[in-house]
Image (tube, rainbow, N blue to C red):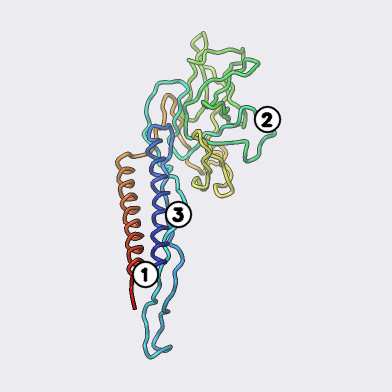
């Protein structure tokens, strides 16, 4: 009876975490570039009351063991990196990636020597802005001020050879290359290209909030799509944003299932408690 109490308690604890994950998915249903998570579970250790045995070991062979499990535990949360709906916005500095790539971004205050794992972060959120530094240089940044990196691992600078340009006339092709239309209606190449990277194991990335991910030993190092021709390149779509891949109906169904699992585990605790009460009331 004590075993069943703790087994059911582990089920309630696991389902509470499951509901937490589902709730986070639902709360981010309108978050640009958000990738839904799902909880994975593992069963706990088993107590073997009787081992299986063959006829060569005993006159009473047992084809199967008698084992009692001790519940469940939350093993991991896994990101689903399937592409969300691509929505047209018409904004010059809105970008969506059609493929497995991530935008590479860097802290605005980081120096060129800051190439460690904590300096670079990655995002699927292409709702970029134009920010200026103290010298008036214009950079392409995230809403949080992280600069977007180009193919040379430098911040993307929005200026022409002669200085100031009209940023509303900037165009970006599907390869991520920047150009603009000058005063003579000529197309001028800015020699800037958005850096797009992939990871061997994107599920190993660490979510750090603000739609950003940090690479880890599990994710592996970034793989530049520009430098590795064998990787299928992502298309950069200007004037579009990738929406959250959360499906509300699916998450609501998952919520109901998790709630019912939580409820039935609480019933198991009540049943075990009643059995203990009855055992304590027995008289000789």
Q: Are marks 3 and 1 in contact (CB under 8 Å)?
A: no
Residue 4: x %, y % from top left = 38, 65
Q: In x, y percent, where is residue 111?
A: 68, 30
Look at the image and tell me in which quarter the N terminus lies.
bottom left
Percent position of residue 216, x then y: 58, 46
210 and 69: which is toward the camera: 69
Q: Compared to 266, does 124 lie above or below?
A: above
Q: Which badge, 3 or 1, is on the more N-terminal residue?
A: 3
- Which is more foreground, mark 1 or mark 2? 1
Query: Which residue is under mark 2?
Result: 111
Work out which quarter of the rendered image holds the C terminus and state it: bottom left
- Residue of label 1: 280
In this rendering, which labeled residue sits more in front, label 3 or label 1? 1
Q: Residue at x 51, y 8 (%)?
A: 184
Say few, some or many: other residues with alpha carbon within 10 Å of mark 2 (under 14 / 14 to 19 / 20 or more): few
Q: Quadrant of residue 113?
A: top right
Identify the residue under disc 3. Answer: 74
């Amino acid at each position: 009876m004590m075993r069943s109490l703790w087994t059911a308690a582990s089920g309630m604890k696991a389902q509470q975490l499951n509901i937490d994950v589902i709730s986070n998915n639902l709360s981010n249903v309108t978050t640009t570039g958000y990738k839904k998570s799902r909880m994975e579970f593992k069963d706990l250790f088993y107590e073997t009351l009787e081992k299986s045995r063959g006829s060569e070991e005993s006159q009473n062979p047992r084809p199967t063991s008698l084992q009692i499990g001790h519940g469940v535990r939350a093993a991991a949360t896994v990101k689903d990196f399937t592409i969300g709906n691509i929505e047209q916005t018409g904004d010059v500095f809105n970008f969506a990636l059609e493929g497995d790539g991530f935008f590479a971004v860097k802290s605005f205050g980081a120096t060129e020597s800051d190439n460690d794992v904590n300096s670079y972060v990655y995002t699927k959120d292409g709702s970029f802005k134009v920010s200026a530094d103290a010298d008036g240089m214009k950079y392409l940044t995230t809403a949080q001020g992280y600069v977007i990196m180009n193919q040379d691992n430098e911040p993307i600078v929005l200026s022409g050879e002669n200085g100031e340009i009209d940023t509303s006339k900037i165009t970006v092709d599907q390869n991520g290359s920047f150009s603009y239309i000058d005063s003579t209606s000529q197309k001028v190449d800015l020699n800037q290209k958005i850096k797009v990277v992939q990871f061997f194991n994107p599920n190993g990335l660490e979510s750090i909030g603000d739609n950003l991910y940090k690479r880890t030993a599990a994710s592996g190092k970034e793989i530049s799509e520009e430098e590795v021709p064998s990787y299928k390149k992502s298309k950069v779509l200007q004037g579009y944003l990738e929406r959250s891949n959360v499906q509300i109906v699916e998450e609501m169904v998952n919520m109901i299932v998790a709630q019912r699992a939580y409820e039935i585990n609480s019933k198991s605790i009540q049943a075990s408690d009643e059995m203990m009460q009855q055992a304590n009331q027995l008289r000789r």
